[in-house]
Image (spheres, helix red, strand yellow):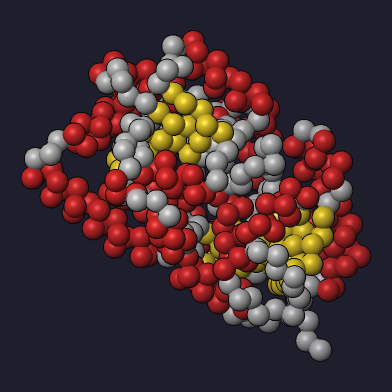
Amino acid sequence: MINKNIIFFINSFWIFSSKGASGGDEFVFQYIENSKINFSKIYILCNIDAKKFAIKRLQGNKSIIWLITPKFFDLFPFYISYFLRTIYATIYMLINGSKFKYIYSSSDFFPDVIPIFINILLRPNSYWIQVVHHFYPRWYKRAGNIFYSFMGYYLQKISLKLIKSSHKIICVNKDLYKFFNKYYSRQEIKLINAGIDLNKIKKIKKKFNYKKLKKKYSAVFLGRLKPSKGIFDLPKIWKNVLKFKPDATLAIIGEGSAQDKKKLKTLIIENNLQNSVKVMGYLSYKRIIKIFYQSKAFILPSREEGFGLVILEALTCDLQVVVWDLKVFRTVYKDLVLRSKCYDFNSFSKQIIKIINSSKNKSSRRLNQLKKLKTQNSLEMQVYKIDEFILKEYMIIKEHRV
């Protein structure tokens, strides 16, 4: 019997309070959830939190064989946990690597790269598919803990050297695609934009009369509560908004570490924003969609992104989006988002105020502009339909040179 088994490495999964997942995690879960994968057996190597999160999405798919790292690994800080997971996965692959024809690495973090690299050295007939979401900015420019930034930057450098032994590299944006095409000659380089489930959003919208919802929030943020997502920029931005719109309100949705959440709440208090900023934590997808329709704008002051999947969801819910003027947003979203001069809080705030004002402007000219933007968004969203993304990724995995 021909070996057509596949193993998905989701060995870098990390969540807070057993809630939420990153865009990179969503990328692989979407594929497994929505595709009719035609493999002999499907294995997923991950920790217990990843399994708990994924199993709800995969609707109890009994064909999946779960390989779970020891739970006590996650009692340690995440870099130590990652090191332990790497050792565990490497030992597992040394013993069992011959079971798998296809090995899919969901990230370029070292727990998802080193065990596969070692397996490929021993078993070159295995087929390694590597996903890369984004490059770390230089460690001294990155927001957050400087030690973690230093480690993350140089560990990714090592990973990028190791994945030169992979067979296919999947990039989620054109900038990555150009880089790998230029510097990596051995691999097939493929570009896949992430997708969203438009039908899922439509079903949620049917459960409430979204067209008649009142706008409770001037703006909404959704993302992991960590420095690289710009969460510590939010109080500064909103303080500027309140100078011109004293009654403006901001909803912040997402989970993060206890330390980062505490710092965010402290900044909100120090800037006297308690009555205008609401930190809502983790919410169900249904609740998120409803809040999107109760908001006038979506803001994402993220300082690094590979794609920004949440922006697609916001655009689908007819929200205008404000971001920093990062190269990735210019490449992926072009004129679909409003870009502000990087880290100029006044510039970002002015974009938000424009949206708030435009929502009150009932002139026919402005309404026509909004209709045009909405139509443009609808057309652009078709490019990112999840079924097209699933089909492209399936073909990329299955079509290979043996």
Q: Position of residue 192 (x, y in %)?
A: 49, 64
Up/down of 23 relative to 240, above or below: below
Viewer-side residue, 258 vs 204: 204
- Determine whether, in the image, residue 302 is placed left or right of residue 142: left
Viewer-side residue, 196 vs 24: 196
Image quadrant holding the C terminus, namely: bottom right
- Determine whether, in the image, residue 104 is placed left or right of residue 84: left
Q: Quadrant of residue 225?
A: top right
Up/down of 131 relative to 124, above or below: above
Up/down of 385 relative to 266, above or below: below
Image point 48% across, 70% down: which residue? Answer: 387
Image point 75% across, 62% down: which residue? Answer: 44
Q: Position of residue 194 (x, y in %)?
A: 48, 59
Total labels: the figure holds: 0
Q: Residue furthest right?
A: 95
Q: Residue furthest left?
A: 364
- Determine whether, in the image, residue 173 is placed left or right of residue 117: left
Image point 80% across, 40% down: which residue? Answer: 74
Viewer-side residue, 178 vs 393: 393
Q: Is residue 2 visible?
A: yes
Viewer-side residue, 378 vs 119: 378
Image quadrant holding the N terminus, namely: bottom right
Q: Is residue 184 visible?
A: no
Q: Position of residue 400 (x, y in %)?
A: 62, 79
Q: Position of residue 335 (x, y in %)?
A: 27, 49
Image point 30% across, 31% down: which residue? Answer: 352
Q: Quadrant of residue 217?
A: top left
